[in-house]
Amino acid sequence: MALLEILQFPNPILRKKCTKITEINKDLRRLADDMCETLDYHKGVGLAGNQVGYMKRIIVIKIPEEEQFRVLINPEITETFGIREVEEGCLSVSGYKGIVNRSLWIKAKGLDMKWQKWKIKADGLLAQVLEHEIDHLNGIMYFDHLVNHVKGDWHSGLIQLEQESK
Ligand code: NI
């Protein structure tokens, strides 16, 4: 396994749309393992393919209340309900956080690493992370959803984090 470099905004790759995965092979399995390791290292909750320069539809998620990583292929949101304001950050936008509008709950579907279909209804952090990571696959950044965002100025509405010692 290996740690991957996480691309930082405004790298243009983060604005590109990822294409569908058509098969699971050895390279993809290795990439998925590396993405999980990278996510764990940075203590993040989710990572999308294009954040590590891979332009296909794969995301990995690890939320604190779950033991396992979720590796999801070609994920899509099929239904959303409601709206709530939540605090959010992104490993590709180091040093900032913001308040965004997210759904109360969502339904999503896709494939797992065994090419089995999955469907989920999620709320709370899992719903938020699914929306955030699937947005990445479509070239959408979380600050596009900021409550007080001025289009064209990506810093606007973001809150700068205090420097943390690593
Ligand atoms: Ni992100």
Image (cartoon, rainbow, N blue to C red):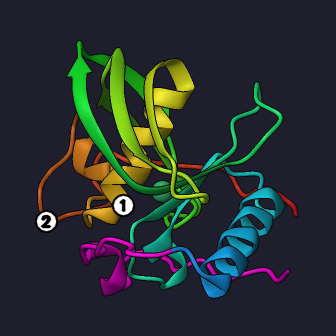
Q: Magenta: predominant secondary structure element?
A: loop
Residue 28 shows in the view: yes
Magenta residues (range)? 1-23
Task: Determine which residue is flagged by label 1.
Answer: 136
Q: Residue at x 76, y 24 (%)?
A: 65
Compare marks 2 and 1 and give the one earlier in the sequence. Answer: 1
Nearest to the observer: residue 160 or residue 35: 35
Gap between marks 2 and 1 measured at Cα = 18 Å
For the C terminus, the quadrant is bottom right
Q: Amino acid at mark 1?
A: His
**Of helix, strand and loop, which one carries label 1?**
helix
Left/right placement of residue 126 relative to residue 36 reads left
Task: Determine which residue is flagged by label 2.
Answer: 152
For the N terminus, the quadrant is bottom right
Q: How many marks?
A: 2
Q: Position of residue 143 (x, y in %)?
A: 31, 50
In the image, residue 33 sits, relative to residue 60, either above or below, namely: below
In the image, residue 125 sits, relative to residue 156, either above or below, namely: above
The local crowd at label 1, few if under 14, some if 14 to 19, many if 20 or more residues have their Cα within 10 Å, is many
Q: Position of residue 97 (x, y in %)?
A: 50, 45
**Of helix, strand and loop, which one carries label 2?**
loop
Q: Amino acid at mark 2?
A: Gly
Q: Position of residue 42 (x, y in %)?
A: 76, 61
- Is the CB atom of the residue marked by disc 2 within 8 angstroms of ligand 1's nearest atom? no
